[in-house]
Amino acid sequence: MVRRMFASDNASGAHPAVLDAIRAANEGHAYAYGDDDWTRAAEAVVRRHLGDEARAFFVFNGTGANVTALAALMRPYEAVICPATAHINVDECGAPERFTGGKSIAVPTPDGKLTPEMVERAIFGVGVEHHSQPRVVSVSQSTEYGTVYGPAEIAALADVAHEHGMYLHVDGARISNAAAALGCSLREMVADAGVDVLSFGGTKNGMLFGEAVVFLRDGLGADFRFVRKQCAQLASKMRFIAAQFIALFGGDLWLENARHANEMARLLAEGMAAVPGVAITQPVEANEVFAILPREAIEPLAKEFGFYVWDERAGEVRWVASWDTTPEDVAAFVAGARRLLAG
């Protein structure tokens, strides 16, 4: 029996169309390091989604995208303002600090989202040599809590960042899920909203591996190819990352996958909200569900269905739906939860 978990959208496999694209790119030889037709075609796909000024650089993974993007924007004496729950603050083992030399200013938020007022309060010591100088505002879309910024919210963050001579970086590991939830284009949510740099995710939405760093303003990223190489994120056989981007974003597959994952998360949240003893803790806006369970039920349920504890002290867990999650998977999970909690 094929097992599908709710631990992460990283636990899912690659979409068959993506595997077919990799297989097709495997025929013959091609020049290395991105000097190939697949990479040029993938760059054109990114421009079609994000505008003619968008310059895409493909990397191996999400941490690599975030680290290299920040390293291109910051000096070692500068800082990035981000939510306390941000991936760059919690889940990257200090890689941003190591590779940028800079500091993270982590801002507590109730729902994973920064506001302009929060950013303003985090800016201090400007021009004072004793303090790290704020240079970047970084947010995740969708957030680590599964919540989503509307285009106007992103634009407001871009405005406050630019007013202070800072950049806005978006960690878009689940950017497709956010766009599907909002019913808007990637361009409306990113380039048109004033974002400077995007970590453009594909792995969580059906790719085997690979992300992109996309610079959206003239003058940014001029030296990025050196940053990417020094950070060990330059793929020699770049065509295999590029081919996946073409398969996922060349048509509507990215949107179909994201819509489906979001719908499965909504279905799961509705089902679990009706289970006695379960409390959903965050709005379900993309493909993640957060809930508090009786502590004695967490371990056996996680062992049977596969998911992670988010906050051990609160007894809060996270369930993530993927592009290949089925209604039957959801129904089995809800039934299992009912059985365990009743026992």
Image (cartoon, grey):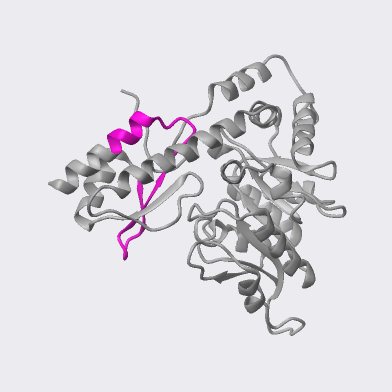
Identified at 74% across, 31% down, the residue is 42
The spot of residue 68 in percent (x, y) is 69, 52
Residue for point 49% across, 52% down: 146
Of all residues, the one furthest to the top in this rendering is 27
Residue 60 at x, y percent in the picture: 62, 40
The mark total stands at 0
Q: Dividing the image into 4 quarters, which one contains the N terminus?
A: top left
Percent x, y for residue 237?
69, 29
Q: Is residue 80 left or right of residue 321?
A: right
When asked about the image quadrant of residue 335, the answer is: top left
At x 23%, y 55%, the residue is 277
Residue 293 appears left or right of 266: left
Q: Is residue 77 visible in the rendered structure shown here?
A: no
**Magenta stretch: residue 162 in it?**
no
329 is within the stretch colored magenta: yes
- Nearer-the-camera pick, 59 or 149: 149
Relative to 334, does residue 134 appear above or below in the rendering? below
Q: Quarter of the image holding residue 235?
A: top right
Q: Residue furthest right?
A: 219
Stretch of the chain drawn in magenta: 307-333
Q: Residue at x 51, y 58 (%)?
A: 93
Relative to residue 302, is residue 153 depicted above or below? Answer: below
List x then y, in percent, for residue 314: 32, 64
Vertical comparison of 26 with 241: above or below: above
Picture quadrant where residue 33 is located:
top right
Residue in front for this viewpoint, 61 or 2:
2
- Viewer-closest of 152 and 17: 152
Question: Going by the image, does 39 lie left or right of 244?
Answer: right
In this rendering, does residue 211 appear at all? yes
